[in-house]
Structures are given as C-alpha cells and as structure tokens.
Amino acid sequence: MLEVFITRKIHDSGVQMLKKAGFKITVYPKDQIIDRKSLLQGSKNKDAVLSLLTDKIDDEFFTSAGSKLKIVANYAVGFDNVDLQSAQKHKVVVTNTPSDKVNESVAEHTFALMLALARRITEADHFAKRGQYKGWSPTLLNGTDVYGKTLGLIGAGRIGSMVARRAVKGFGMKLIYSGPSHNPELEKELGAKKVSQTALLQKSDFVSLHVPLLPSTRHLISDKEFKLMKKTSFLINTARGPVVDEKALLKALKAKQIAGAGIDVFECEPSIDCDLSDNLALKQFDNVILTPHIASATEEARRAMSEVAAKNIIAVLKGKKPLTPAKVN
Ligand code: GLV
Ligand code: GLV
C-alpha cells in the first residue's frame, strides 16, 4: 500500500481524496509546527509527503526520507521552504498549490490591507472600542481614498493580476507594474504599464509585493527603495517577509518616509519583529497593520489547497504528471 505522510492537520477534503485513492495516510497528530525529528521520522519510507511552508524540506530531509519518496506536495503557493535542486537530485517531484481560488483569497486579503490602511480601519476600531468617540468631527481619523490612486505591483504574476483586477475594475485605480516578466494580458485588459522598479516606487500610492522569495528578491525593498517612495504611499506585503528589509522598514516608518504598511508576512517569522529588543518594533506603529500570515486563510482557499495537494499526490503516485509542479519562472 502506498503511504502518505501529512505534516499537520489540514482541511479534510484533500485527506478524504487521498483515502479514497487507496493510500495509507498518517497525519502528524499535534496541531502545531512539526519538530524536525518528527518530520524526518514521519517521512521515512513514505511514497509522498504533504508538507507545509513551515517545514524545511532540504537535502537532509530527502536523504532521510529514502528512495521510495516520489513527491513532496507543499500546501502553499510559495515553496521557498523546499530545496528544489536537492529534490531533483533525489528524483522527487515538488508541487505547490497555486489554484485560482487560493490566489483570489490572497488578492482579497491584499486589498483588505490596502483599504484598512487608507481608511485607518484598525485605528478607528480601537478608538471606538476604547470609548473615545464623543461625536462626529470633520477632522476625526481622516484617511485617504483608494479610488483613482496609482497601484504599483512588484510582480504581476497570477496573484498580482488578481489584485490588479480588483484595483482597476472596483476602484478605478491606475496600474503600473515592475518585475522580470511582461504581462501583455494585464496591459490589454486593464491598461497596466510596465515601468522600472525605481519609477514604480516613485509614482505609486500603494506598492504591493507579489514576488516569490528568491536570492534575487531577498531585501528587494530596503533603504534605497523606501527613500524613493512617496511620503504618502503605503507598502503592502502578502508575499514573503524577507522580501522587505525589516530594519529599513522600521527606519522608513520612524522617519515618516512612507505613510504606512500592511504586513502579513514577517522577515523573522514566526517572530513579528526580528529584533525583540528594538523599541521601534513594528507593533508600535498605528499606521502599520499586521496580520499573522493569513492571506490564504479562508474556508474556500484552504479547501482548494488541500484538494490541489491531494490531486498532485494522486497523479504522481499513479505515474502521471503533477498538476502544478513547483517551478521558478
Ligand atoms: C502562503 O503563504 C502560501 O504561499 O500559500
Ligand atoms: C504568484 O502566483 C504570484 O503572483 O506571484
């Protein structure tokens, strides 16, 4: 019987699909990030491993898992936790979960952060709940409009494009993008313009990051980039924490070089702040909204992630091609 190891409890629909396909399923029993020893032990002699973005899938993992392993199905769109070269060396297929449903959920969360920043929703919520509201005022908690503003997408792949549609069709925003690839559909459909990253940072009212974490995107946004941004602009990161240099972000916030930031992913995750002794830490800024890596945390997205991961495992264990192999564009 073919055996699948799942490194943490996930949405049940994919697990049921795997059971129906006749595989023996083992799920790490604790609902917490699996420790290294349990990850290596649980994966030994399995035919497939369904991993999470919190699992380090490296050469030691592949060596320890053994030669039966055919596929690591990562339950995430991102796969920077997986060493693809090592996977190739060990002849293991790696897949991710970039389904439209998941990408739409991430785009929606990105937009939620944009709106919440512009309209100061979290500040207003705290204000109201603390009992500070004493009557309508012309100057109370004034924010800025999103409507008609310029959105700059760094990375206009699948998720970026879904953010773009919301921006242009829902909020009449102007769209510019930068990154290694051209997106002619986005230009045709939404009037997007490709510009240099420098021009994008100088012109955008909202800068949103939609690039994978690669050596070339680590600290893509650092001191120099913050200095290029408008003082009235907002940064949104629902991609990966290390794409933004957190120290530089803190400096930019303190110097009021930008108007605020919406951050779902952290450089030193699961720590919110890299330097806990730093009294400039992210959580001290009212104009920063922090969410704990939940951009794809919806019933719909998590079901889709679980099903896409399961379909990939079923395909590969039946000798077919994976649906969504992890690849760097
Ligand atoms: C979440 O961060 C994902 O990559 O799906
Ligand atoms: C991935 O799908 C992205 O938009 O970066």
Image (cartoon, rainbow, N blue to C red):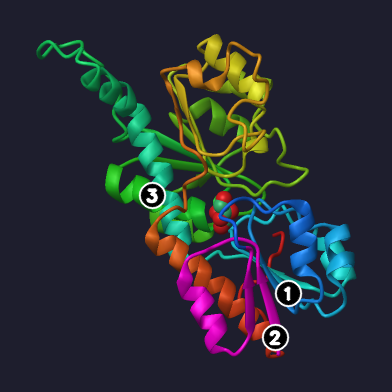
Q: In this view, does 305 lie to the left or right of 167?
A: right
Residue 119 appears in the figure: no
Residue 296 at what x, y percent from top left? 47, 53
- Vertical placement of residue 91 versus 20, above or below: above
- Vertical placement of residue 268 versus 62, above or below: above
Q: In this view, does 204 lie to the left or right of 165?
A: right
Q: Give the range drawn in magenta.
A: 1-28
| Label 3 sits on residue | 108
Q: Does the magenta stretch include residue 24?
A: yes
Q: In this view, does 149 lie to the left or right of 4?
A: left
Question: In the image shown, does 195 or 136 lie closer to the viewer?
Answer: 136
Question: In the image shown, does 117 or 167 lie closer to the viewer?
Answer: 117
- Could you tell me if the residues under marks 2 and 1 are in contact, i.e. CB atoms within 8 Å? yes
Q: Which amino acid does label 1 sit on?
A: Ile
Q: Is residue 154 magenta?
A: no
Q: Earlier in the sequence, mark 2 or mark 3?
A: 3
The number of discs equals 3
Q: Residue 303 appears in which quarter of the rendering?
A: bottom left
- Please name the residue shown 40% across and 58% down the image: 189
Query: What label sits on residue 71 in the rendered view?
Result: 1
| Label 2 sits on residue | 317
- Please name the residue shown 62% across and 84% down the image: 314
SS assignment at label 3: helix
> How busy is the neighbourhood of tag 1: few (under 14 within 10 Å), some, or many (20 plus)?
many
SS assignment at label 1: strand
Residue 229 at what x, y percent from top left? 54, 23
